[in-house]
C-alpha cells in the first residue's frame, strides 16, 4: 500500500509540474479564455460603472431626489443578491457558458432599452432589476468557475487579469458616457452602450469562452471537495459573508455618489467624471497586484491590507473639496476594492474546492448586493437630510476597518485539502 501511495503521489506531482509549465506559457489556451472572460466582464459592468454619470442628469430631468434615484442602484444590487445563489447553483450544474452568453444578451438589450426611460421610477427600477440578474450571470461568479478549471498555480494572476476587464470598463466608460450625454443626451448614451455590448461582447463570448476539467490539486481532491452544506456550517464562510457586506458598503456608496459629491463641492461635472475613471484605473492596478500577491502570500492578510486602503479612501472622500483630493480618495477606494474582488473567489476555491464554487460565490454575492443597496441609500438619505455626505462616509469607513480586522481571524487556507481546514473551524 505504501509503495502504491508513493507511486500515486509521484504521478500527481509530475502531472502538477506539467500543468504549471503550461500556465507559464502565453500561448496556453487558458490565457485566451481569460481574455475573453475579461471582455465579458468589461461589458457586463456597464450599468454599474456608468450609473454615477447618469445620476445627476436623470435627477435634473425628472426632478427625482438623490435618495430616490440611488434606490434604483439598490434595485440592481438587490436583484443581483437574490439571484446570485440560484445562478451559482445553475452554473455548477449546467456549466458557466450556458449562463454567461444569455446574460450578456439580456444585459445589452436592457441597457439599450433605457433610451426609452419614462419619469416613472418603477420603470427605472424594473430595468435595473433585470440588469442585476443579467450582471450576475456574466459576473466573476461564472468567470471564476471557467478560469479556475484552466489554472492552478497561476490562479490568482489569471483571476486578476480577467478582472482587468471590469476595471478598464470603470476607467474608460465614465468619461465616454459623459461625452455622449453632453453631445447627444442621456437617451442616446444608453442606446450606444447597449448596442456596443451586443456587437462586441456576445461574439467574443461565443467564440472563446469555454470550460475544461479541473486541473492539479482540484482534480486530485475530487469528491473530497467541500459541499455547500458543509461550507454553510463553517465559520470561514460566514466570516467572508460579513466581510463582503462591511467591506463593500462604502465602495458601492462611493460609486453612486462620487460625481454628485464633487460637483456639489464646486468641481465641474466633466472633471468630476475623472474621479470615477481614477477609481477604475486604481481598481485595475489593485486587481493585478492582488492576483500576484495571492500566489505568494496568505490571502487573508492580503485582503486585510486592501480593506484598510478602502477605509482610508473613504475617510479622504468625506473631506474632499477639490478634484485632486477626490481623485486620491477614489484611487484608494478603487485599488483596495479591486483587490478585494480577487480575494473572495480565490479563498472560496482554496477553502472549499471547485465542486460548489459558483453556488458559494453566489451566496457571497448576496452580501455584496445587500451592501450595494445599503451604502448608496444611506449616503443619499444623509445628503437629503443634511446636505452633506461627510458623516455617513466616515461611518462607512469605520465599518470597513472592522471587517479588515475580521479577516485576520481566518485560519490558513489549505492548498491540499480544503475540507480539512474548514472542518477544523466550525461555525
Image (cartoon, rainbow, N blue to C red):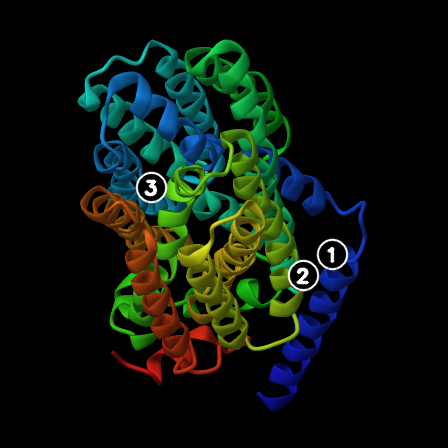
Quarter of the image that includes the C terminus: bottom left
Quarter of the image that includes the N terminus: bottom right
Q: Is residue 133 visible?
A: yes
Circle 1 residues within 10 Å: few <14, some 14–19, many ≥20? many
425 on left or right of 269: left
Sequence-wise, which precedes: disc 3 or disc 1? 1
Q: Which residue is mark 1?
A: 23
Q: Which residue is mark 3?
A: 87
Q: Which residue is mark 2?
A: 154
- Is the Cβ of the residue at disc 2 closer than 8 Å to that at disc 1? yes
58 on left or right of 67: right
C-alpha separation, residue under disc 2 versus residue under disc 1: 7 Å
Identify whether 278 is placed above or below 243. above
Quadrant position of residue 35:
top right
Q: Nearer the viewer, residue 131 or 149?
A: 131
318 on left or right of 77: right
Residue 157: percent from left, percent from top: 66, 58
Amino acid at each position: 500500500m505504501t509503495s502504491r501511495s508513493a507511486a500515486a503521489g509521484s504521478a500527481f506531482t509530475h502531472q502538477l509540474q506539467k500543468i504549471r509549465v503550461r500556465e507559464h506559457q502565453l500561448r496556453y489556451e487558458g490565457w485566451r479564455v481569460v481574455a475573453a472572460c475579461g471582455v465579458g466582464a468589461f461589458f457586463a459592468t456597464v450599468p454599474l460603472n456608468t450609473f454615477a454619470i447618469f445620476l445627476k442628469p436623470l435627477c435634473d430631468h425628472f426632478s427625482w431626489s438623490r435618495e430616490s434615484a440611488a434606490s434604483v442602484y439598490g434595485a440592481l444590487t438587490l436583484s443581483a443578491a437574490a439571484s446570485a445563489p440560484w445562478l451559482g447553483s445553475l452554473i455548477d450544474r449546467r456549466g458557466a457558458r450556458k449562463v454567461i452568453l444569455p446574460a450578456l444578451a439580456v444585459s445589452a438589450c436592457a441597457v439599450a432599452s433605457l433610451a426609452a426611460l419614462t419619469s416613472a421610477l418603477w420603470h427605472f427600477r424594473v430595468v435595473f432589476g433585470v440588469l442585476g440578474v443579467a450582471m450576475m450571470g456574466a459576473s466573476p461568479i461564472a468567470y471564476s468557475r471557467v478560469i479556475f478549471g484552466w489554472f492552478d498555480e497561476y490562479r490568482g494572476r489569471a483571476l486578476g487579469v480577467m478582472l482587468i476587464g471590469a476595471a478598464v470598463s470603470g476607467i474608460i466608460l465614465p468619461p465616454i458616457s459623459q461625452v455622449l450625454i453632453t453631445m447627444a443626451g442621456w437617451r442616446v448614451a444608453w442606446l450606444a452602450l447597449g448596442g456596443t455590448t451586443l456587437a462586441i461582447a456576445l461574439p467574443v463570448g461565443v467564440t472563446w469562452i469555454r470550460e475544461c476539467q479541473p486541473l492539479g490539486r482540484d482534480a486530485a481532491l475530487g469528491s473530497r471537495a467541500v459541499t455547500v452544506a458543509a461550507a454553510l456550517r463553517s465559520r470561514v464562510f460566514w466570516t467572508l459573508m460579513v466581510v463582503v457586506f462591511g467591506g463593500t458598503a462604502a465602495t458601492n456608496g462611493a460609486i453612486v455618489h462620487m460625481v454628485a459629491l464633487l460637483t456639489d463641492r464646486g468641481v465641474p461635472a466633466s472633471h468630476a467624471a475623472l474621479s470615477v475613471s481614477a477609481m477604475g484605473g486604481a481598481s485595475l492596478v489593485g486587481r493585478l497586484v492582488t492576483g500576484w500577491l495571492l500566489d505568494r502570500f496568505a490571502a487573508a492578510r492580503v485582503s486585510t491590507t486592501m480593506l484598510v486602503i478602502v477605509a482610508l479612501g473613504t475617510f479622504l472622500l468625506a473631506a474632499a473639496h477639490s478634484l485632486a483630493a477626490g481623485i486620491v480618495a477614489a484611487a484608494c477606494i478603487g485599488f483596495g476594492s479591486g483587490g478585494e474582488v480577487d480575494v473572495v473567489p480565490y479563498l472560496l476555491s482554496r477553502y472549499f474546492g471547485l465542486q460548489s464554487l459558483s453556488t458559494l460565490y453566489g451566496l457571497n454575492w448576496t452580501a455584496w448586493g445587500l451592501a450595494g443597496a445599503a451604502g448608496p441609500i444611506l449616503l443619499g438619505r444623509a445628503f437629503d437630510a443634511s446636505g452633506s455626505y461627510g458623516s455617513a462616509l466616515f461611518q462607512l469607513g469605520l465599518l470597513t476597518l472592522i471587517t479588515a480586522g475580521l479577516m485576520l481571524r481566518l485560519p490558513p487556507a489549505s492548498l491540499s485539502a480544503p475540507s480539512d481546514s474548514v472542518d477544523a473551524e466550525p461555525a
